[in-house]
Amino acid sequence: MLLAMRIGAVVLILLGLVWLGQGLGYIPGSFMTGQAFWALAGFVCVVAGGFLAYLGFLRPRQGS
């Protein structure tokens, strides 16, 4: 479970950064370039990935 959470966090953050970059126009060459929807979707993915990273990597373990 913990490994899946960590992998999900990394994937969400990386995907979110790509979408955010495309939505803001920093990564050209796609229909997503310059579209506010993809910037917002990327931001949401980065935040969700950050939350999963907190749960999977940073949160102190219970009972240790």
Image (cartoon, grey):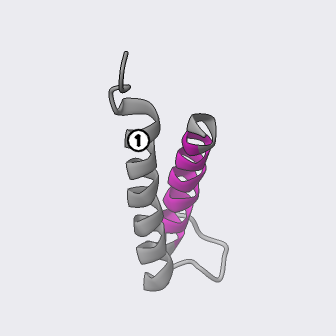
Q: Quadrant of the C terminus?
A: top left
Residue position marked by numbered label 1 in the rendering: 55
> At x 47% / y 63%, what residue is drawn?
45
Query: Farthest residue toward the left?
Result: 60
Left or right of 23 in this view: 8: right
Give the residue type at disc 1: Leu
> At x 66% / y 72%, what residue is drawn?
29
Q: Image quadrant of residue 4?
A: top right
Q: Secondary structure at mark 1?
A: helix
> At x 56% / y 77%, what residue is drawn?
33
Residue 22 position within the rendered picture, expressed as x and y whole percent measured from the top left: 53, 69
In the displayed structure, 12 sits above or below 61; it is: below
Residue 2 position within the rendered picture, expressed as x and y whole percent measured from the top left: 56, 36
In the displayed structure, 18 sits above or below 25; it is: above
| Camera-side residue of 13 and 21 | 13
Residue 24 on the magenta span: no
Which secondary structure is most common in the magenta stretch? helix
Q: Please tell me how many numbered marks the rendered image carries.
A: 1
Mark 1 nearby-residue class (10 Å; few <14, some 14–19, many ≥20): some
Magenta region: 5-22
Residue 44 position within the rendered picture, expressed as x and y whole percent measured from the top left: 41, 68
Left or right of 23 in this view: 11: right
> At x 41% / y 41%, what residue is drawn?
55
Q: Quadrant of the N terminus?
A: top right
| Camera-side residue of 40 and 3 | 3
Residue 43 position within the rendered picture, expressed as x and y whole percent measured from the top left: 40, 66
| Camera-side residue of 60 and 11 | 60
Left or right of 32 in this view: 60: left
Query: Farthest residue toward the top?
Result: 64
